Amino acid sequence: MKRFIAYGIGVLTAGLLLGATAYAHTPLCSCNDNGDRTITCEGGFSDGSSAAGVSMTIKDKSGKVLTKGKMDKMSSYTFQKPAGPYKVIFDAGPGHVVEIDGKTITE
């Protein structure tokens, strides 16, 4: 009986550990200049999950929020290109944040 319980606990522990690994995913976000004074960002996760609803924030170099929004159902977000230096923040929660410096965004 003790052997059966120990075996069951071992299987349960292994299942929990493997299950947690299977759900791990890395946030991905890339942005492109559309050439019409707008920027479009597309996001997702390394496991293929959608980024629909993920918070997007555009900040100037001092950290002031210029605009906020969310990824649409196609996991994209378009905003007006700021006049000065800026950064894009894709925020899907703790450990799932991507920051993109505006000067790296090209056509």
Image (spheres, grey):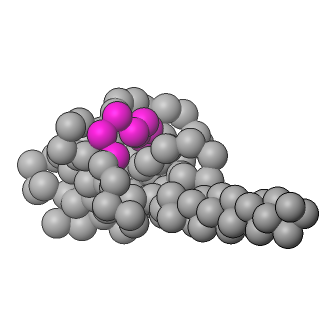
Residue 8 placement: quadrant: bottom right
Residue 60: x and y in percent read 48, 42
Q: Where, quadrant-wise, is the C terminus in this rendering?
A: bottom left
76 relative to 53, above or below = below
Q: How many marks overall?
A: 0
Relative to 35, 43 lies left or right: right
Residue positioned 9% across, 49% down in the render: 36
Q: Which residue lies furthest to the left in this view?
A: 36
Q: Is residue 55 above or below residue 102?
A: above
Q: Is residue 91 visible?
A: yes
Magenta-drawn segment: 51-58
Q: In which quarter of the image is residue 62?
A: top right
Would residue 29 be seen by someone viewing this image from the given angle? no
Pick whichever, 29 or 11, lies toward us. Answer: 11
Quarter holding residue 55: top left
Give the vertical position of 16 relative to 55 (above or below): below
Residue 86 x/y as whole percent: 43, 49
On screen, residue 103 above or below 56? below
* Front residue of 74 and 60: 74
Q: Which residue is drawn at 26% across and 54% down?
A: 42
Viewer-closest of 78 and 24: 24
Quarter of the image with the N terminus in it: bottom right
**Which residue occupies 69% across, 59% down?**
12
Magenta-colored stretch includes residue 24: no
